């Protein structure tokens, strides 16, 4: 697993960032925490998944590139919107969103 720097963090969990990251790295269940990953399917830019997926042995977390962490799906969706805005501001092109985070 690889972490994007600077990691995007939902407003409701900003003060708990270090603890949440530690728990993810050490396979501790966090039911309401969602991860925003760089998609690996070649079509999408992002993938939002519950952090609990990382606890399952089959999940390919070695390949995961975590861009952000949020509490709940609503906050994760808002965070993705912010990420897209940031990428467009920096690159000036919607086709370069993925490249911005690589």
Image (spheres, helix red, strand yellow):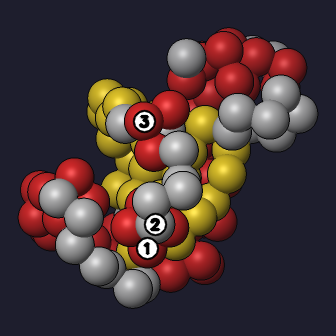
Q: Which residue is mark 2?
A: 56
Tell me the element at label 2: loop
Q: CA distance from mark 2 to mark 3?
A: 12 Å
Mark 2 neighbour class, 10 Å CA radius: few under 14, some 14 to 19, many 20 or more? few
User: Badge 1: few (under 14), some or many (20 or more) residues near its Cα, within 10 Å?
Assistant: some
Q: Which residue is at the front of the view, 92 or 77?
A: 77
Task: Determine contact: label 2, label 1, CB under 8 Å.
Answer: yes
The vertical placement of 33 against 48, above or below, is below
Residue 15: quadrant of the picture: bottom left
Looking at the image, which residue is at 42% across and 36% down?
62
Q: Is residue 53 shown above or below 96?
A: below
Closer to the chain start, of discs 2 and 3, is 2
Q: Residue furthest bottom?
A: 31
Instruction: Name the residue nearer the viewer: 89 or 6.
Output: 6
Q: Which x, y percent locates residue 6?
A: 31, 33
Is residue 85 in view from this perspective? no
Mark positioned earlier in the residue sequence (1 or 3): 1
**Which label was assigned to residue 60?**
none
- Which image quarter is the N terminus in? top left
In the image, residue 87 lies at what x, y percent? 63, 27
Residue at 80 percent across and 35 percent down: it is 41
Q: Label 3 crowding class (10 Å Cα cut-off): few <14, some 14-19, many 20+?
A: few
Cα separation, mark 2 vs mark 1, equals 7 Å
Tell us which disc is closer to us: 2 or 1: 2
Which residue: 45% across, 59% down?
57
Q: CA distance from mark 1 to mark 3?
A: 15 Å
**Exactly how many numbered labels are in the figure?**
3
Residue 24 image point, x, y percent: 26, 60
**What is the x, y in percent for residue 74?**
60, 78
Report the disc number at residue 52: 1
Q: Can you tell which mark lies on residue 62?
A: 3
């Amino acid at each position: 697993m690889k972490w994007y720097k600077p990691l995007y963090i939902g407003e409701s969990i900003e003060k708990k960032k270090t603890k949440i990251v530690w728990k993810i790295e050490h396979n501790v269940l966090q039911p309401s925490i969602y991860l925003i990953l760089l998609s690996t399917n070649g079509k999408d830019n992002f993938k939002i998944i519950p952090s609990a997926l990382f606890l399952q042995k089959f999940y390919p977390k070695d390949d995961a590139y975590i861009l952000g962490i949020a509490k709940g799906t609503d906050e994760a969706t808002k965070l993705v919107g912010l990420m897209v805005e940031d990428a467009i501001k920096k690159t000036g092109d919607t086709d370069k969103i993925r490249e911005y985070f690589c």
